[in-house]
Image (tube, rainbow, N blue to C red):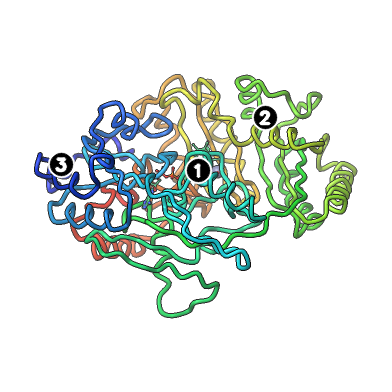
Amino acid sequence: VPASSKVVRDERFATLDDQDIKHFSGIVGSKGLVVDKDELEVANTDWMRKFKGSAQLLLRPQSSNQVAEILKYSSSRRIAVVPQGGNTGLVGGSVPVFDEVIVNLGAMNSIISFDEVSGILICEAGCILETLDKFLADKGFMFPLDLGAKGSCQIGGNVSTNAGGLRLIRYGSLHGNILGLEVVLSDGTILDMLSSLRKDNTGYDLKQLFIGAEGTLGVVTKVAVLTPQKLPSVNVGFLACTDYTSCQKMLLEARKHLGEVLSAFEFIDSFALDMVLKHSGHRHPLPDAKEKFYLLIETTGSNQSHDKEKLDNFVETVLTQGLVVDGTIAQDNTQISNFWHIREAWFLQLPPLGKAGAVYKYDLSIPIKDLYNLVEILRERLGGLATVVAYGHLGDGNLHLNISAPDYDEKASFFFQIEPFVYEWTAAHKGSVSAEHGLGFMKAHAIHYSRSPETVELMRKMKAMLDPNGILNPYKVIA
Ligand code: FAD
Ligand code: S2G
Ligand code: ZN
């Protein structure tokens, strides 16, 4: 049964009193202490407007020391807190469930250092992803992570959700690119793991614990990340496939023919594409195509003529093989961004999907051969009750399954056609119920579909050791 329908406030947590407010104000100053109703309303509500808390206080610390003071006091008073970044999370992890105090890192947004030889950047957790990427671009580098929320999400939140994004196929996971972290523990200890060495095998690699911990083990305050060169030649193809088998063969062919320059391999099915085009004003990149699957394939390299020729030849080859029935290669940057916008922001502009809580979202890792079967099965199960659309990072075996319904209601009859079926099916196919968005509040009850009881038990023990009073983002990740 979904977490939200059965959770009750843990009465071991204190409720704020004036003394607390005064104490917090002494730490963050008046500019770091927000009690304004409208600002609280925004901070209490998640991006999709599906989850809403009732925090009476939002703190905006300006330094790691202030974060340490906040947590030390909160632990002593057993005040629950929710670490918050850009609040673009999609699983209800970044907003309170009840009256937890929100600690937003946005005011801690300075770039501390950048080494132009190694490409190692050290910055504060509140830096916005797009700001970092622009800073790096001026120096010929790029952030090894890109996702549709780049304009709002903070690097502290990206680390805490172990965000995957659109180019993981090329640049790998944050577990590989993050070299060091500074993290504040629930007792106020400032853990300096800000190593900026590529190799540092000295004891346990504890920073990895906090990558993907969703704010439940500590507050990330600084990040050291290895950034790659920003290469000049980017080419993007938008291709139409008749069936899912061809999509899988296309992934093989792309790896074979595009090899080292392949930088993204995304898919969007016709149901999702139709919704995008209907609501976003974009033109169909392949107006004559009536296919069921579309691929967005990007290459990034150092030599435009070589790379363009490589992609042209690839498209020619797969057209001849009949793996794609139509395809186009972006002729300029405008077309490149249009293709990307169709993939990235599609669901933001859709009244049925963008409306408050009108979408049931599932972010699943599934063995690529089985991935689209789940979409077809759900379409069958739901019939005309809801619209099932699918897209995602096919190169990573990451399906974004979205079910659009007139209203979001976890008690709606058809909801029980979706859950727990979608989790059971994923588990039965050795997949993961959370590929990249995390478990948050929405899927805290679902962790056992993808982790063994012994593993979950060890997680609980680690959580108890690092956060004995359980004040860090309670009710999340492990219900
Ligand atoms: P928030 O939403 O504020 O918080 C997310 C979680 O991290 C919460 O549990 C919060 O408590 C915790 N947290 C935040 N900051 C800290 C900190 N400093 N220390 C400790 N804990 C912290 N995600 C992907 O993985 N791939 C995608 O392709 C992708 N595309 C997206 C596209 C759109 C349009 C949108 C709206 C979201 C998308 N997301 C994607 C989801 C979301 O953007 C990511 O999860 C992102 O990493 C969240 O960052 P944030 O700063 O908004 O964190
Ligand atoms: C993406 C986020 C948006 C969604 O677009 O890759 O991770 O709808 C997703 O799930
Ligand atoms: Zn994604």
SS type, badge 2: helix
- Residue beneath the point at 42% across and 33% down: 47
The amino acid beneath tag 3 is Ile
Q: How much space separates mark 1 and mark 2, taking CA atoms?
A: 19 Å
Viewer-side label of 3, 2: 3
Q: Dividing the image into 4 quarters, which one contains the N terminus? A: top left
10 Å neighbourhood of mark 1: few (<14), some, or many (≥20)? Answer: many
Give above or below for 231 relative to 466: above
Give the image location of residue 421, x and y in percent.
44, 40
- Residue beneath the point at 46% across and 48% down: 127
- Name the residue beneath numbered marker 2: 270
Q: How much space separates mark 3 and mark 2, taking CA atoms?
A: 52 Å
The amino acid beneath tag 1 is Asp
Viewer-side label of 1, 3: 3
Q: Which mark is residue 363?
A: 1
SS type, badge 1: strand
The amino acid beneath tag 2 is Ser
State the image quarter where residue 284 is shown: top right
Q: Which mark is residue 21?
A: 3
SS type, badge 3: helix
